[in-house]
Image (cartoon, rainbow, N blue to C red):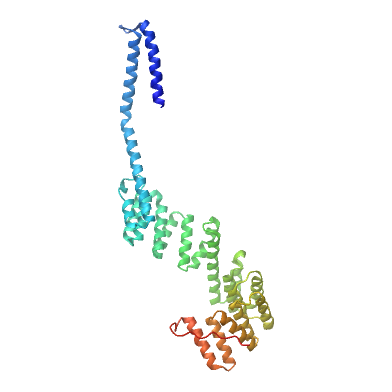
Amino acid sequence: MKTGLIIIVTLLVATVLASLLMQDPGYVMFNFRGYLLETSVPVIVLILIGLYVLVRLLLHVWRAPRALGRMAGQYRARREQRLLTSGLLDLAEGNWSRGERTLTRGVRKNENPLLNYLSAARAAQLQGAYERRDNWLRMAYEQSPDAGNAVLLTQAELQMAHGQSDQALATLSRLLEIAPEHAQGLGMLARLRRERQDWDGVMELLPKLRARKVLPAAELDALAVGAYANALSKLERAPDAAALEAQWSSVPRNLRANPVLLKAWADALKKCGQSAQAEPVIRRQLNQSWDSGLALEYSRLDVADKTKHLTRAEAWLAEHSDDPMLLLAVARLSMRNELWGKARSYLETSLGIKPTAEGYQLYGRLLEKLGESVNASEAFRAGLSLATHLDQDLPALERPRRRR
């Protein structure tokens, strides 16, 4: 549109000038170093126009290789983008073999082949071709050394997905040697150590993970709970009251109400002969936020006033009367207080709601105490079956009926 307008305006101007020059063509004379040139105005105008056109033509010829190179580059870029998109679509649709071939077609000529190689490595892994996966990753590293961290992260991720935890650990260690503060690498290493149950290693990473907010808060708390629970369980195996107090003090306050940590702390206190210290803490926590497992742990505490211990646990039945774990807890405390009839009622109700190995064990002990040896043997056998998942093809025992 713009070019057409320029042509039309040029023609109009030329027409006007031509009409004027027809009446008087004018006269132009050049004298340069003894050379004399005489001509009319239209001729000199045509000469100037010719020179302009010649200069423009020479410029186009001069720029042609660059323009052709740019056009070729644009074509290659469009082709590379098309192959990359097509390959990724194949992967998304589950056509892993075709996707791998598409992603690596002519990839050596790509200016930026990193994404192709990384995606091809994923495709190879999905086909179980782990040697080919490693080859693509190696080529990605060689072609894009500046993106080495991304390659190592991808390699570690694929190794973890394949269950190659030792190799993944080595890859992440290499990454963190290069970039010790790499956030994504720290997060992946923490997850890997959790999978390997290396809680000491997780504990070592916790300060960096918190400082850099690498993981979501919920996941970070879960990692911390596992690490601190492991530390507390070690003290349970080697009782040391002073070390236990120091370890519990190191637990962040927002985690001290966690049932897993409270249970680990209470178990360690029992080994130190100080389980009574946990009673008010667990009782307050249960009053604020109910947890069935923690209620059962409450019944295992060794408290001096056994009657008050039972009374406090029974008070929770007002709101949690159908909780089998709480019923099991008050049954245990009833047995500790030698209230055999009450204990039997609680146990039979608990087992009627949800049979458990621990429940049948307590029930068997109670029946032995009451002189019912045959029924006690049946209860022990039922508990053993639940605990070991044996006798699955045999008819299940009837659940005990609550005595009236």
Q: List x then y, in percent, for residue 2.
A: 41, 26
Pick the front one: 157 or 342? 342
Q: Quadrant of residue 267?
A: bottom right
Q: Position of residue 73 (x, y in %)?
A: 34, 39
Image quarter of residue 399: bottom right
Frontmost residue, 188 versus 169: 188
Counting from the top left corner in percent of width and height, residue 291 is at 60, 72
Residue 350 in sight in this render: yes
Q: Quadrant of residue 91?
A: bottom left
Residue ID at (46%, 57%):
185
Q: Is residue 26 left or right of residue 241?
A: left
| Residue at 58%, 70% in the rendered image | 261
Towards the viewer: 38 or 343: 343
| Left or right relative to 99: residue 260 | right
Dividing the image into 4 quarters, which one contains the C terminus?
bottom right
Q: Is residue 170 left or right of residue 400?
A: left
Location of the N terminus by quadrant is top left
Residue 111 vertical placement versus 294 (above, below): above
Where 390 falls versus 203 (above or below)? Answer: below
> Residue 190, image x and y in percent?
48, 62
User: Can the viewer see residue 144?
Assistant: no
